[in-house]
Amino acid sequence: MYDCKFLLRPLFITIFFASIPMPVPSFAQAQLLPEISSYTQQRIDEFAEIPAERQQQLKELSAYVSKKQQADQTARLTFICTHNSRRSHLAQVWSHVAAIYYQVEGVETFSGGTEATAFNPRAIAALRRCGMQIDSDDSQSTNPHYSVRCQTVDKPSALPAVCYSKVFSMPPNPQADFCAVMTCTQADGACPIVQGCDMRIAITYEDPKVGDGQPEEAAIYDARCAQIAREMLFMMSHVKK
């Protein structure tokens, strides 16, 4: 007679491992610049630090991406904050990196504000410290356009993202069929309705500008950058392929 405990054990192991995101093939990591590949792995190792309530919000966003994939449609994510200077740019960049890392096809990321200012140099510096290659068309402009590169491979999808401050409803941001992700409470309150979006969700972050001019300025920006990277990676890891 067999002991039923041993018959059930393989099923338990299968169920347990099914709940863990599958490892990424090495070639996917190799597409990222080496420093960024190492940085993303560190953030993935911190998934347990994300509170349960926040994990649920991120899974709602991943479900939106999954639904678009299943319908063979492009998932367009527009991250919105008040000035489109810090958090929305960080979320745009890291959701793009996360899609590359987890090989999630058909995702386009954008950012915008309720008003246009400029991509803050402190946020740019934080991304550079992660390994991003960032160049400007005119650093003396009031609103420079920045080319942000995270990949090593030479193909159209590896072209650098062009980041600059803009109102969320302005081109090249999508005008319809996109998810509006509110990254700050002020923009969330100011925009109860985002015209054209087919989903609106608030995933807000504390503004790192609280550290501007303080001795801990870089540390505060690095912490916010790491939080956003961690959460965008967590979100993409749950997209059903």
Image (cartoon, rainbow, N blue to C red):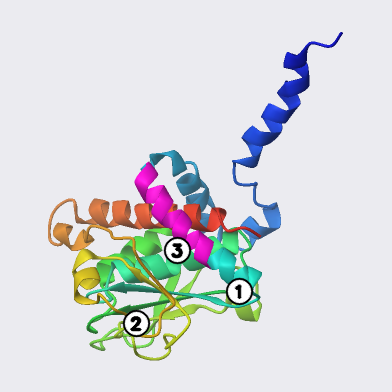
Residue, far bottom: 171
**Label located before the other in sequence (1 or 3):** 3
Residue at horizontal 55%, vertical 53%? 238
- Badge 3 crowding class, 10 Å Cα cut-off, few under 14, some 14 to 19, many 20 or more, is many
**Front residue (pair 146, 194):** 194
Q: CA distance from mark 1 to mark 2?
A: 22 Å
Q: Nearer the viewer, mark 1 or mark 2?
A: 1
Label placed on residue 106? 1
Q: Quadrant of residue 9?
A: top right
Magenta span of residues: 52-64
Question: What's under tag 1, amino acid-wise?
Answer: Gly
> In the picture, which quadrant includes the N terminus?
top right
**Label located before the other in sequence (3 or 2):** 3
Q: Position of residue 138 (x, y in %)?
A: 33, 88
> In the picture, which quadrant includes the C terminus?
bottom right
* Helix, strand or loop: magenta stretch: helix
178 on left or right of 53: right
Residue linked to disc 2: 164
Image: 141 above or below 54 = below
Label placed on residue 78? none
**Front residue (pair 219, 70):** 70
Residue linked to disc 3: 94
Q: Nearer the viewer, mark 1 or mark 3?
A: 1
131 on left or right of 32: left
**Front residue (pair 82, 63):** 63
Q: Position of residue 110 (x, y in %)?
A: 42, 77
For the residue labelled by badge 1, is the local secondary structure a helix, a strand or a loop?
loop
Q: Is residue 239 magenta?
A: no
1 on left or right of 149: right
Image: 112 above or below 48 = below
